[in-house]
Image: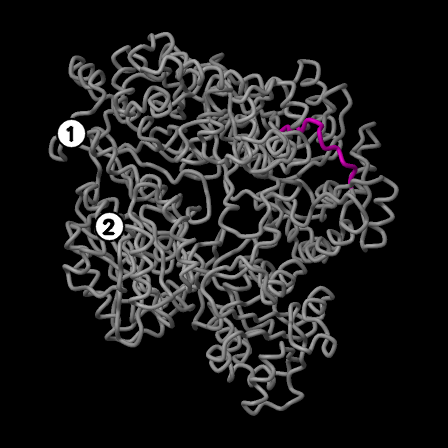
Amino acid sequence: TVKDVILREKPDGVIVSMGGQTALNVGIELWNEGFLQEHKIEILGTQIPVIEATEDREIFSEKLKEIGETIALSYSATNVEEAKEAANKIGYPVLVRAAFALGGLGSGFADNEEELVLLAQKAFTTSSQILIDQDLRGWKELEYEVVRDNQNNCITVCNMENFDPLGIHTGDSIVVAPSQTLSNREYFMLRTTAIKVVRHLGIVGECNIQYALDPKSMRYCIIEVNARLSRSSALASKATGYPLAYVATKLSLGRDLVSIRNSVTKTTTACFEPSLDYCVLKMPRWDLKKFQRVSNTLGSSMLSVGEVMAIGRGFEEVIQKACRMVNPNLKGLEGVESGLIPPEVYNDKETLDGELRKPTDTRLFAVMCALEQGYSVDDVHNLTKIDNWFLSKLERICHQRKATKIIGDVHKLSPIQLRTLKCSGFSDKQIGNYCNDTSEMEVRATRLKHNIQPAIKQIDTLAAEFPAMTNYLYCTYNGTEDDVTGSVCSIQEDEQSVTHRARSGTLTSITAPEKNIKEQGVMVLGCGAYCIGSSVEFDWCAVSCVRQLRKDGIKAIVVNYNPETVSTDYDESDRLYFEELSLERVLDIYERERAGGIVVSVGGQIPNNLAHPLYMAGCQILGTHPEDINRAEDRNIFSGMMDELQINQPQWSVLSSTDTAVQFAKDVGYPVLVRPSFVLSGAAMRVAETEAELTNFLGLATEVAADKPVVVTKFILDAKEIEFDAVALNGTILNYAIGEHLENAGVHSGDATVILPAQKLYTATIRLVKKYSSKIAKCLNITGPFNIQFMAKGNQVQVIECNLRASRTFPFVSKTLNSNFISLATRAMCGLKVKPYHISLLDVDYVCVKAPMFSFTRLRGADPMLGVEMASTGEVACFGESEQEAFLNSMLSAGFKMPTRTKCILLSIASEKFRREFHDSVTALLKLGYTLYGTPGTVEYYKRKGIAADAIKTLKKPINSEPLNGEFEDATEYLKEGKIDLLINVSDCCTRRDEISSGYLMRRAAVDFGTSLITNVKCAIKFVECLELGLDSPSALDPKHIGDFYKVPMIGYWRKD
């Protein structure tokens, strides 16, 4: 595809260092094939031979020897025998890594030859070369971000230190910048080495170098050099304010560091090393609890799905901030009271010691449990190998927590004590919890009465040596004065009025007419940490909102804490607060900025959940009224409202007790769906098919929903799910889009394949969807973006839920229709004149398909089967002239491999219904020349239905009580040996099960050994349709520019741009 784009666009040069490992690998392949040289295309920045020197372990080692530097003992291998030989040379345990891989994919530690062979087999499915490394677990891990130009000017922009010792992938470790535990001598030793190595390799642009440092000596090893921008580059850019990608691009174009301006000071050059007078901490976000049988042990393969960055002036402050950012349900860094460590762990010393020895996603909280229970810093260090300096800071948090609990009354805390707690990162809610459950707002009022407020500080890169001309801000209690004065709009307000409002602890509610948002600006709340269910889609929405505000002359103030986002680029807004999305902090900023209103509907569920508390505190919420947002989010109220509007919905009952839920299920019949309120990505949503499952799922849902309602509804089988995305003004819909799920209901919308415009909906169905949506919009008086999910069976349409915020499909809809729905929604929410886009869905002459992206290869043991709780970690969308073309493009973009190597496909379809549905596809595959294998039940069914007895070869299931065990070869062995190109495994249930089944073992083997997998019968049928149309031929899918599709005229409906 890249070749086709190059041939079409005929570029003069290519930059391969900006798109991560994927871009790097593609660039190397194009260069080695001679394609780039043939078409006289120049590689800009770091050259391919230099990149190969950093990626190929043997070349890298030789290059370092030339300058007297060494890497950790390491050997490369191209087969399992070579890997065993390398491991024997080094000695077990060893680290197994796939070369040219992203995020440690395919890596792990092997304690013996058996573990080595298994890891090596899996690693070879992702790379032709693997690396066997010396095990240095327990050493410190450090990283330097380095920039070099073509004049050999070279600087280190940022150095970072992992909180955890070596052995955990840096993407899964807490990272602190600048380093906190290095001596001056150690810091400059590693800095000097970094510059020497980068200059010797000849890198032009940005790179990072990772070290292992022996904590007991000055000995160090170079782990690797990444000659590209990485996750760490984004973190370093946000941590220092030094725009690494921008500078690296300029350097790739031939500029030097001296000629590029410092974008923060506006006066100095980019040839400087940032000096920080603050501390930054990155904490990963995991979603491992969504998956059964997945170990939460952290190692060399990255498992996190997102990260947060906290800024402050003390380690205690930033680590407590980061905990709340990663999990908004946490009040701060606590052990027992975090609820993340079970009583059976913290009440048993041996079990707790085991938790401390093993790095997991909750070990930090286990450390706090240990310190709370009297473990010394040395005790914890001996078990975890975490540096004593970090542990002493955590111990201080424990002591402060204990002292506050002893005092037990917020009014008995002296101003000095209260300020000390705030300087250590304790939230108002946390302090109230320690003081007889005092409310957060009462603690806030007490704090403001003592004039204890956070100072607003700038990220200035030069520690105030030069004046900073930047809008990049953070809040800290470890400061006595603000770096910036006044609000973003410099609005004059009566000082007594401000003081009165501040000291009352609440903000006077100001109605829209009194607040001129053009003069006072608008706060936009961002998406927070990326997680399953909230990813870059919501960042796109926030950025689109901010850009529209500024386009309309309205000052935009962004609050967000995700270093991976565009919304946290300080040049995107008028003021950027890199801060928590909590009630406390948003109120602090709102009051300081005197903003005209807050937009909560473009950042996903976290800002949406803040709408009502902010409204109750007196903030002006723009768009749909917070009371109406609550009516939509509360599943009990919403279901009652649908009954009043006479809008069809599945039979439902609010959970008042387990007994009533069980009785409801008996009355309507299983299966039933358990749905908590106010959650994202279907958290704790489950389909129960038995009473035992229902009881189990109700407990989980109640835990997740806390004090919010849990509703049980009848689950409708074989229904089609429909997405309705729209923008409304005062209850009237301005624009809408209707997309359909390819999979039937039972697959979460975030995991579903969505087709836009819908291709197979009845006209009567579309009419009902529009009618119901209009009723709902009017009843809730919606202004702004919203999403409604429907299900349709025949011509019966039922509503599932309504989200009064932008949904994850808004970017997909906007890009498909070339109409930015968020821009329209922003103008509507701000009370500006709006003009709907001219869109006629029936006249769109192309199709766009959104497909999910999964990380099952990293989640060892996870069942790669889809259900009502979301599991995907990303998505792709592709255009096509037909539904099939767009579908196949999207599958290939998501990493699907066509079955062209052996042309062997394994079928394992559980139910007669699905086997019957797939019958014509089986016939088509045989006609197309594919070799089909099947499990006994599947083969027997198709034989009975007239397919030749020898047409499908039989393989036995991994778990089989029938007397077929010795008669047929094992299906999983065929998958492990690479004899199968594609596994089509369709289960008969909607929820991932706890038990290990034959289907699970086959699905898992397919993922582990790089075999393509389809688990939904609708997707399997659509894929076979693509093969029948010949779309698998190399020339069938001709890449087109997105503009080519937009230029296609809409027949009968002319549109003005």
* Residue on which disc 1 sits: 509
Q: Nearer the viewer, residue 292 or 946?
A: 292
Give the mark nearest the N terminus, 2 or 1.
Answer: 1
Q: In which quarter of the image is residue 458?
A: top left
Q: Position of residue 818 (x, y in %)?
A: 34, 57
Q: Where is residue 101 in the image (x, y as percent from the top left)?
A: 66, 48
- Residue 930 vertical position relative to residue 985 in the rendered view, above or below: below
Q: Nearer the viewer, residue 942 or 555?
A: 942
Q: Which of 413 and 130 is in front in this view?
A: 413
Q: Where is residue 232 in the image (x, y as percent from the top left)?
A: 58, 35
Q: Quadrant of residue 725?
A: bottom left
Residue 8 covered by magenta stretch: no
Residue 119 in the figure: left or right of residue 80: left
Q: Do the residues labelled 2 and 1 touch (CB within 8 Å)?
A: no
Q: Which label was assigned to residue 89? A: none
Q: How many labels does the image show?
A: 2
Question: In the rendered structure, which amino acid carries the disc numbered 2?
Answer: Ala
- Residue 788 vertical position relative to residue 1034 in the rendered view, above or below: above
User: Where does the magenta region start and end?
Assistant: 133-144
Residue 497 in the figure: left or right of residue 117: left
Q: Which of 833 and 495 is in front in this view?
A: 495
- Residue 922 vertical position relative to residue 37 in the rendered view, above or below: below
Question: In the rendered structure, which amino acid carries the disc numbered 1?
Answer: Ser
* Residue on which disc 2 sits: 632
| Quadrant including the C terminus | bottom left
Q: Quadrant of residue 839?
A: bottom left
Residue at x-position 60% and y-position 43%: 302
Residue 142 covered by magenta stretch: yes
| Quadrant including the N terminus | bottom right
Tell me the element at label 2: helix
